[in-house]
Amino acid sequence: MSLIITGASGHLGRRTAELLLDQVEPSTVVLVSRRPEELADLAARGAETRRGDFNDPASLLEAFAGGERLLIISTDAVGQRVSQHANAIDAAKRAGVHAVAYTSFTNPSPENPSAVSADHRETEALLTASGLEWTLLRNALYSEFRIPEAQAALASGTLHHNQGTGRSAYVSREDCAAVAAAWLAGGSEHAGRVYDVTGPELLGADDLAKIYSAAGGSPVTAANVDDEAFVAGMQGAGLPPEVAGLLASFGAAIRGGHLDQAPNTVEELTGRPPRRVSEVLAGAL
């Protein structure tokens, strides 16, 4: 029986595959992607590659055949991906997969104003009601996304934000991949568990400004603005309206205290502490 990773040609999927191949017999690893040709280097390490498209249920049934444990990495089609995830969950059941983990988002409750919360909440409900053994990996906001934010703040001297005094424990993609690989290599001890995958420290905007200043070597001051002004500023910087709105929704979620979890999940599952934002920024600015 195989350990299957969807979205294996994406950033998170590829890194999860690389880490998993270091932990298990490579021939047990199946990597699913719409573009399996991009995984030739991992195939050379012994993994099997298969084509699978979340918009093509028949392809998923073939891709998941013989699977024991399946990692469903959420797609990037915000607002449209629940049906895609439903296709994957249904294919997993039909293919006889035993256990499924889904990469969700921190606290996807109805009260959370983040624009991605509804998709994740609905997918979680589908998975937990599926009859499959399930695990939820609720990944926090990526520390890597702080790199362009830090660059802009260092260039202007100001970190414009709409987070108020809220805080969040940003997590590195590397740590999310390590947790996912640990789940794939693990067993039933993860059944029915909800893991908040976070960084080690809750940071507010003032904390980020200090970190950016130290990493970039020039002063940065945090300036809180309302949501409308934040969106206008992001659009003024060249971001499309939908992206600016998405970023503003994250700020609103932080401001409302919806993303203030900081458990010890990374160390619990991987045996090492998670990376700090300052570590992720080191050498990137």
Image: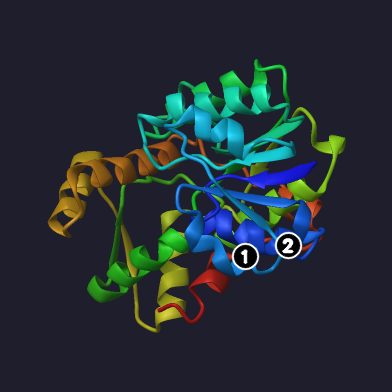
- In this rendering, is residue 75 above or below 278? above
Identity of the residue drawn at 63% across and 56% down: 177
Horizontal side of 155 relative to 68 (left or right) equals left
- In this rendering, is residue 56 above or below 43? above
Viewer-closest of 105 and 152: 105
Q: Position of residue 85 (x, y in %)?
A: 51, 29
Q: Which corner quadrant holds the N terminus?
A: top right
Viewer-closest of 126 and 258: 126
Q: Quadrant of residue 278?
A: bottom right
| Cβ–Cβ under 8 Å for marks 2 and 1 | yes
The amino acid type found where label 1 is placed reads Leu
Numbered tag placed on residue 21 in the rendering: 2
Identity of the residue drawn at 41% across and 40% down: 255
Numbered tag placed on residue 200 in the rendering: none
* Residues at marks 2 and 1, CA–CA distance in whole angstroms: 9 Å
| Front of the two marks 2 and 1 | 1
Q: What residue is disc 1 on?
A: 42
Identity of the residue drawn at 42% across and 62% down: 146
Q: Which corner quadrant holds the C terminus?
A: bottom left
Residue 74 seen in this snapshot: yes
Q: Position of residue 137 (x, y in %)?
A: 64, 40
